[in-house]
Amino acid sequence: MTAATLAHDAHGDVDQLYIETRELRLQGFLLFLISDCVLFSSFIFAYLYMRNSGQGWPPPGIHRLDVPFAAWNSVVLFGSGATMHYALENFKHGHWMRYMIFLLATIVLGAGFLAGQGYEYTHLIYGEHVTWAGSGIFGASFFTLTGMHGLHVFIGVCYLTVLVLQSSAGVYTRGKYFGITAGTLYWHFVDVIWVVLFSIFYLI
Amino acid sequence: MSVAAVHPGGIADHIHPEPQGFVRRYVFSLDHKIIGIQYIITAFVFFMLSGLLAEVIRTQLLNPNGGFVSSDTYNEVYSVHGSAMVWLVIIPLLTGGFGNLVFPLQIGARDVAFPWLNMLSFWIFPVSGLMLFASFLMGAPTAGWMEYPPVSLQGAAGTSMWCAAIFLVGVSSTMTGINFVVTILKMRAPGMTFTRMPLFCWGQFATAPLLMIATTALAAALAALFIEREFGVPFYDPTKGGSPVMWQHMFWFYSHPAVYIMILPAFGIISEVLPTFSRKPIFGYKLIAFSSMAIALAGFMVWAHHMFTSGLAPFLQLPFMILTFVIGVPTGIKIFSWTATLFGGKIHFSTAMLFALGFIGLFTLGGITGIFLAAIPFDLHVHGTYFIVAHLHYVLVGGSLMGVFAGMYYWFPKMSGRLLNETLGKWHFWLFFLGFNGTFIPMHWLGMLGMPREVATYDPQFAFWNRFESVASYLMAFSILLFFVNVLWSIRNGKRSGPNPWGGRTLEWQIPSPPHYYNFKHIPTVYGLPYDFAQPLPYKGLDEELTDSPPAVAAGAH
């Protein structure tokens, strides 16, 4: 998407053109999220398909996942959704410091979620010997889907870090902040995907 | 800044300065017209390569015992032929090629919504095409264009390359889809309401969401196949708990909509060519437009009709059969509307029109065998035989490719300012028509008699018709050669076309050929449908387009 969002950046500050092309970018970005959503949906379909054609779930020899730990980790991620929301709202209202604090909090919480996921992976791989390739369809679906989601969170954390640097350099103004809007949308999207993944892997 | 006109989406009018230098103008161009032509040239290069592969297939089948290439090579050849024709030829020609070239002109826009994304989409496409053909160097895929596991899991290293290539071309398609949806939603000229849009734009508008949504599902399936082949993570291998049928679900969830990606823009081309050369308003404008949307939507609900022999539960088979029958209804509406457009018209048999008429006939045949195949009892009988090969070539060659040729003869003047030679064009059409039918009609009865597809040798009782088909396929190849000669000759020596050689009424014919970098001097205002030949043109603000005056909006002025 970067190519698209850069398409008109050569123009000056807040002008009519920027405000109008922002609508194009917003629509294009939402369509990108829809197609990303289809990517997750396809893997989720694959997981449910394999789960229902096997011999019970989890398959013999594999323990249930650690639900309380993942639940706390989810709380961290959902909390980061809230801080991101406040970051954008504060930016819109011109509260620069509060914006930065909430943005940094989002990054810390996002990184915390990734750390939690890393801990969970380590525990599964070394503690219970459940691996990506060596544990049948359980390992395949669990690590692929949560890994894909983790990759999205990682990309999000990187992007938010770029936002911090750009904001400090004064790239965004009160009339011109599509980059922040896009980051917020993406971050909420990643949150919503996690709601679904948490439900289908840990709760059912 | 000066605001000369505002689009319905609220986009102010502005012109970017025209880039200078060969590289910025013709190689890494941001101009939708140049990118469209780049797509068309690249896709025709791949068309030539995969057409040669098709002739290898037919040469092998001259004799029941084959002998032209080894069975393994034969498997590679038909697999790459199918993959390349679908992903590197038909889809890029109809969406990236004609889509980019024509529809922004038709809706009165200066470019697509995201020109940089458009350039990126294009440049991914030749790279992925080269990757696909490079898979021959490391053992090409051998399981057909569908690459069903477990065969594709055991295929040579080139199968992984195939996954990566198709994944990349899918990324390109997805970006094109996003670009086109936003462009059509937001960048139409004032007065260009949805029900005044030319039907080619409707075809693209129905196709773009399919590109955007269905292709991502394929990307997931390909990623899983790649991961399983390279890292041994079990998705499709039944010995490790995976399911090969799951691949079929995921693959056809993309590939059935892909069938409509390959035909809806061709429907659009036909709907432009027919009224222009019959000098008559298109019959049932709204029906044609809305039936495209109906086909696109219903296309997501019929994928499992490719899987009637894959052990699908009987309670699932019936709805898929019925939905597939239902999808024949909007298609039938189109065929009816086109025929009614011809009725009583002043038909001018130009080459473009011949291809459009050929399209109607051949696509109808392919569509009817499609209805046969939707019926489970019949499908069980002919599944995996040459009947399927006949059906898919009637819709993809007799349908999509005929549409591409109609579009080439129709819009070549808009690309180059010169007409394609009509005499050569008519030879091209008739030889192609005869060669095509000679190649694929006998496959219907060969399939009914039980000749399996994708085999390098066959029962000697089928020898006569196979030889007949091979000879006819050489005729078809020769006609394509005539087409290439025609293009290469006409681009330098063709008759100058002027802005509007066919008396077309859509917006692209009201501006010079080839159009200026900025398309329109003033963004026109639209007052009605373009197809009413008895009325004056329904546009205002086009008076200066064919004069020497500069554009109303200065370049770079905002």
Image: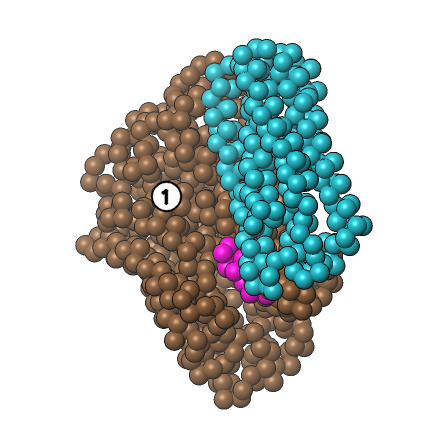
Name, please, the residue furthest toward the bottom. B461
Residue A75 screen position, x and y as percent: 62, 33
| x 52%, y 66%: residue | B477
Tell me if B510 is positioned left or right of B61 in this view. left
What span is colored magenta in the figure?
Answer: B244-255
Chain identity for the colour brown used in the image: B
Q: Residue B349: which quarter of the image?
A: bottom left
Residue A58 vertical placement versus A192 (above, below) = below
How was the colour assigned to the protein in this rendering?
by chain
Whether residue B249 is in magenta: the answer is yes
| x 62%, y 16%: residue | A99
Reading the image, the residue beneath label 1 is: B202
Amino acid at the residue labelled 1:
Trp
| x 62%, y 55%: residue | B222
Residue B361 screen position, x and y as percent: 33, 64
Tell me if B336 is positioned left or right of B178 in this view. left
Does the image show residue A19? yes
- Circle 1 packing at 10 Å, graded few (<14), some (14-19), many (20+), is many
| x 38%, y 35%: residue | B107
Foreground: B84 or A189?
A189
Residue A176 screen position, x and y as percent: 55, 17
Name, please, the residue furthest toward the front. A68
Foreground: A48 or B508?
A48
Chain identity for the colour cyan used in the image: A
Main secondary-structure element of the magenta-colored stretch: helix
Foreground: B315 or B487?
B315
Tell me if B170 is positioned left or right of B532 in this view. right
Q: Residue A109: which quarter of the image?
A: top right
User: Could you tell me which chain the residue with mark 1 belongs to?
Assistant: B
Residue A138 screen position, x and y as percent: 66, 56
**Numbered circles on residues, count:** 1
